[in-house]
Image: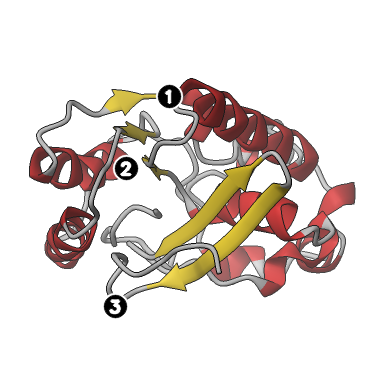
Amino acid sequence: MRHGQTPSTGQRLPGRAPGLHLSDAGRDEAAAAAARVAELKRVDAVYTSPLERARETAGPIAAARKIKPTVDRGLLECDFGEWTGTELKKLMKLPEWRTVQGYPSGFRFPGGESFLEMQDRIVGAVGRLVDRHRGGVVVCVSHADPIKSVVAQAVGTPLDLFQRIVISTCSVSVVAYSPAGPLVLAVNSTGESLAELAPS
């Protein structure tokens, strides 16, 4: 699940800068997400990125399931380096923005992480949590680009096409991991019940 809205969602590239909290709308989204997760028959664990906006989203979800959320640094936002905090409209004017959108596997944020490193990190973190909770249900609260990269890996989509995936605030994307490989059950789900999702 992506965290809920913040005051700068869609306006700035917040990255890993501390101190960014959910807006009122984001808190409402987190409460609605918690109600959706509460419909599930079981949830074995709730993990969250260490950033405030993710922890504030994970809190109501974990409380609804009477589970203590666990911080996992593997779920962190991409390190945008020198671009952290910059207005998106300014970034979109840079020549590098075309690479970010069309050839992300070849891009490293100045002073930060590459998209390949981000994908390796979060896919590794998800794999570690799958191994820890084999056969269970785990909720991970993270950020748009890391979630897009997990979904891309699960469906076998090259990282250079991952910008075609949309991950809205407090949307749920569901992947069932099995010895035969991952099955993507939902992407960017924002309203329907999660209780009926199962491999066909």
Whole-percent x and y of residue 23?
18, 59
**Residue drawn at (38%, 65%), measured in percent from left and top?**
171
**Residue drawn at (26%, 61%), measured in percent from left and top?**
7
Contact (Cβ within 8 Å) of mark 1 with mark 3? no
Identify residue for label 2.
Answer: 54
Identify residue for label 3.
Answer: 191
Whole-percent x and y of residue 109?
73, 42
Q: Quadrant of residue 29?
A: bottom left
Does residue 112 show up? yes
Image quadrant where one finds the C terminus? bottom right
Identify residue for label 1.
Answer: 72
* 92 on left or right of 101: left
Contact (Cβ within 8 Å) of mark 1 with mark 2? no
Does residue 149 show up? no
**Residue drawn at (49%, 34%), measured in percent from left and top?**
76
First-in-chain label (1 vs 3):
1
From the image, state whether disc 1 or disc 2 is nearer to you. Answer: 1
Residue 184 sits above or below residue 120 on the image? below
Mark 1: amino acid: Asp
Mark 3: amino acid: Gly
Query: Dot 1: within a 10 Å radius of its alpha carbon, few (fewer than 14), some, or many (20 or more) residues?
Result: some
Tell me the distance, in whole angstroms, between the alpha carbons under discs 1 and 3. 26 Å
**Residue drawn at (50%, 68%), measured in percent from left and top?**
186
Q: Secondary structure at mark 1?
A: loop
Mark 2: amino acid: Ala
Q: State the scheme by which the image is colored.
A: secondary structure
